[in-house]
Amino acid sequence: ELSSLARTLLQESLLFPLCRLCNVRKGATRVAMDALEILYIKYNYDGSVAHARADHTRWDAFQEILFIVYRESAG
């Protein structure tokens, strides 16, 4: 189960804004994990990987989300 911080991040900084952006671009298929990471960094950190990773709390929560989402879909 996701932590409270991960759930908040998913809702506020990832799920709603990126789903809209992603769905406009790709249609109904799920985006690859690395492409989702790029979208997250672009949307929240103006494309700066260094800034995204320097925000340790949010980066860790984002990685937690990716692990849960893509682990569940792989199984």
Image (tube, rainbow, N blue to C red):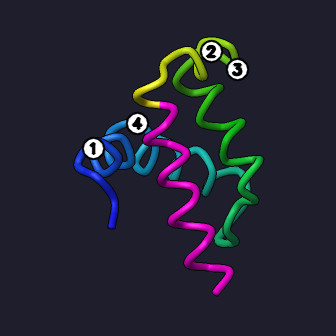
| Mark 1 neighbour class, 10 Å CA radius: few under 14, some 14 to 19, many 20 or more | some
Which of the two residues, 53 or 47, is positioned nearer the viewer here?
Answer: 53
Q: Is residue 41 above or below residue 2?
A: above
Q: CA distance from mark 3 to mark 1?
A: 21 Å
Q: Magenta part mainly helix, strand or loop?
A: helix
Which of marks 2 and 4 precedes in the sequence?
4
- State left or right for residue 15 relative to residue 41: left
Please tell me the numbered disc located at residue 46. 2
Above-or-below relation of 58 to 65: above
Evaluate if marks 2 and 1 touch, with contact meaning CB atoms under 8 Å apart. no
Q: In the rendered structure, which disc, 4 or 1, sits on the residue that comes first in sequence?
A: 1
* Residue on which disc 1 sits: 8
Question: What residue is pinned by disc 3?
Answer: 49
Q: Is residue 71 magenta?
A: yes
Q: Is residue 2 shown left or right of residue 46?
A: left
Eye-nearest disc, 2 or 1: 1
In the rendered image, which residue does mark 4 sit on? Answer: 13
Question: Dividing the image into 4 quarters, which one contains the C terminus?
Answer: bottom right
Q: Which sits earlier in the primary sequence, circle 3 or circle 4?
A: 4
Q: Amino acid at mark 2?
A: Asp
Determine the CA span between mark 4 and mark 2.
13 Å
- Residue 35 at x, y percent in the picture: 76, 47
Mark 4 vs mark 1: in front: 1
Question: Mark 3 is on which residue type?
Answer: Val
Disc 4 to disc 1, C-alpha distance: 8 Å
| SS type, badge 4 | helix
Q: Are marks 4 and 2 in contact (CB under 8 Å)?
A: no
Q: Residue at x 67, y 41 (%)?
A: 37
* Gap between marks 2 and 1 measured at Cα: 20 Å
* Residue at horizontal 43 percent and vertical 30 percent from the top: 58
